[in-house]
Image: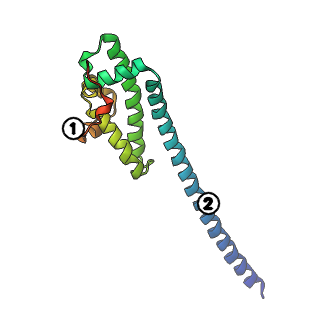
Amino acid sequence: MSLEDIYFLSQIISALALVVSLLFVGIQIRHNTMSTQTARHQSIVQAVSDWSRDVALSTEISALLGKGSANFELLEPVQRLQFSLLHVALFRNYENIYYQHEQRAIDHHVWEGWSYRMRATFALPGVRAWWVPQRDSYSEAFRDFLEETPLSSTNAPTHLAMNAD
């Protein structure tokens, strides 16, 4: 085997090693992307779960949320402020979820459930009344999503709103 043959053989081996290395890097990037998406989704679930837990642990806040969701106008001024602050927090989480979906960072199967939950919350009469003065503080794309693809109020989960009596 000549020196030239050895040189060409070493070049072929180097090229194969490079291809194997690139394949390995590609697999690692894919795995890292999946891990990042999983962590992002867990973070989203945790934020909404924390909000829900905080509401559920307070009978007063749960009653306020139910009453306001049925009819925002029946709330006293302080209750309206509380209701508004609760929904600002919730809808900021919803807007983040929507943004993550638009960035293709949330699997479409997972998105279906979040989309329903957002639109179901938005369909509640008291939430719709709260939304009107708040809408401009959210992104145009998120506003369009909620306002252009609403659930009908007959499909809204009635257990989220309580009668005023």
Q: Give residue 23's position: percent from left, percent from top.
A: 60, 65
Look at the image and tell me in which quarter the N terminus lies. Answer: bottom right
Q: Callout 2: few (<14), some (14-19), or many (20+) C-alpha neighbours within 10 Å? A: few
- Residue that protrudes farthest toward the bottom in the picture: 1
Q: Where 44 sits versus 103, above or below?
A: above
Q: Element type at marker 2? A: helix
Q: Give residue 98's position: percent from left, percent from top.
A: 38, 41
Residue 56 visible here: yes
Q: Nearer the viewer, residue 100 or 65?
A: 65
- Residue that protrudes farthest toward the top in the picture: 77
Q: Nearer the viewer, residue 164 or 117?
A: 164
Residue 140 visible here: no
Res 32 label: none
**Residue at 24 percent of width and 28 percent of height:** 125
Res 154 label: 1
* Nearer the camera: disc 1 or disc 2: 1
Q: Where 60 sits versus 155, above or below?
A: above
Indicate the amino acid at tag 2.
Val
Number of numbered discs overlaid on the protein picture: 2
Q: Quadrant of residue 132?
A: top left
Q: Quadrant of residue 8?
A: bottom right
Look at the image and tell me in which quarter the C terminus lies. Answer: top left
Q: Element type at marker 1? A: loop
Residue indicated by mark 2: 25
**Residue at 35 percent of width and 11 percent of height:** 78
Left or right: 80, with 97 as reference point? left
